[in-house]
Image: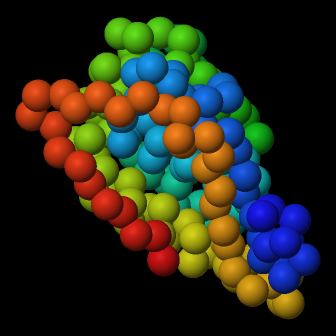
């Protein structure tokens, strides 16, 4: 599928859901949303205006303890900022207590994260090749993710532009 889309001139961001970001036996919407965010930021390095990194900078004080490292987000290179974003998603899979804490923080900020994702996608489309038909995110192996309904949680559908 990926090769077919690339032949049709789509920019494809592909990752396996059960690989490094998402714990297959304990996954929720926030985990998948944040993993998609991470892979988009890594695949498309917007240098000037990056709405996702701006979103993260605005919430850095509440997120930095999840990276398990002390530093200031300000002053880091673009690659350094992306690296810290990746550390957070990796820690989410490895440390269950941090995963619950991050879910709470992401769930509280989901509307603004989705808005930042949509803004990022609009900016990314401008930076892609002129013959590019669009941007596609493929999250493989979602069928391997165990569905668990938690008390008080609700299913949510999200559409990115």
The residue sitting at 35% across, 33% down in the picture is: 147
Question: Residue at coordinates 54% horizontally, 42% vertically from top-left?
Answer: 142
How many marks on residues? 0
Colouring convention used in this rendered image of the protein: rainbow
- Nearer the observer, 150 or 60: 150
Seen in the picture, residue 133 relative to 16 is either above or below; the reply is below
For residue 21, side relative to residue 56 (left or right): right
Residue 9 percent across, percent down from the top left: 84, 81
Which residue appears at 48% of the width and 32% of the height? 145
Task: Specify whether residue 159 is in view.
Answer: yes
Residue 63 visible in the current orientation: no
Q: Position of residue 143 (x, y in %)?
A: 53, 41
Residue 68 in the image, given as x and y percentages of width and height: 52, 12
Q: Residue furthest left?
A: 152
Judge whether 15 appears above or below 103 on screen: below
Q: Which of the two residues, 90 or 45, is positioned nearer the viewer here? A: 90
Q: Is residue 44 left or right of residue 53?
A: right
Task: Tell me which corner region of the image, top left, top right, bottom left or bottom right, holds residue 26.
Answer: top left
Q: Residue furthest bottom?
A: 131
Asked if residue 130 lies left or right of residue 65, the reply is right
Which image quadrant is residue 5 in? bottom right
Classify residue 148 as left or right of residue 130: left
Q: Quadrant of the N terminus?
A: bottom right
Quarter of the image holding residue 70?
top right
36 above or below 47?
A: above
Q: x and y percent of residue 157 in the render?
A: 31, 60
């Amino acid at each position: 599928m990926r090769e077919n889309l690339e032949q049709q001139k789509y920019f494809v961001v592909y990752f396996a859901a059960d690989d490094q970001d998402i714990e297959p036996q304990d996954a929720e919407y926030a985990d998948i949303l944040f993993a998609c965010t991470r892979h988009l930021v890594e695949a498309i390095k917007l240098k000037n205006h990056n709405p996702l990194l701006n979103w993260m900078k605005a919430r850095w004080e509440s997120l930095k303890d999840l990276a398990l490292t002390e530093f200031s987000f300000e002053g880091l290179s673009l690659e350094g900022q992306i690296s810290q974003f990746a550390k957070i998603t990796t820690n989410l899979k490895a440390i269950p207590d941090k995963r619950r804490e991050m879910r709470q923080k992401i769930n509280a900020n989901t509307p603004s994260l989705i808005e930042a994702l949509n803004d990022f996608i609009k900016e990314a489309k401008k930076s892609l090749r002129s013959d590019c038909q669009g941007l596609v995110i493929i999250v493989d192996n979602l069928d391997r993710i165990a569905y668990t309904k938690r008390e008080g949680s609700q299913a949510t559908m999200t559409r990115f532009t």
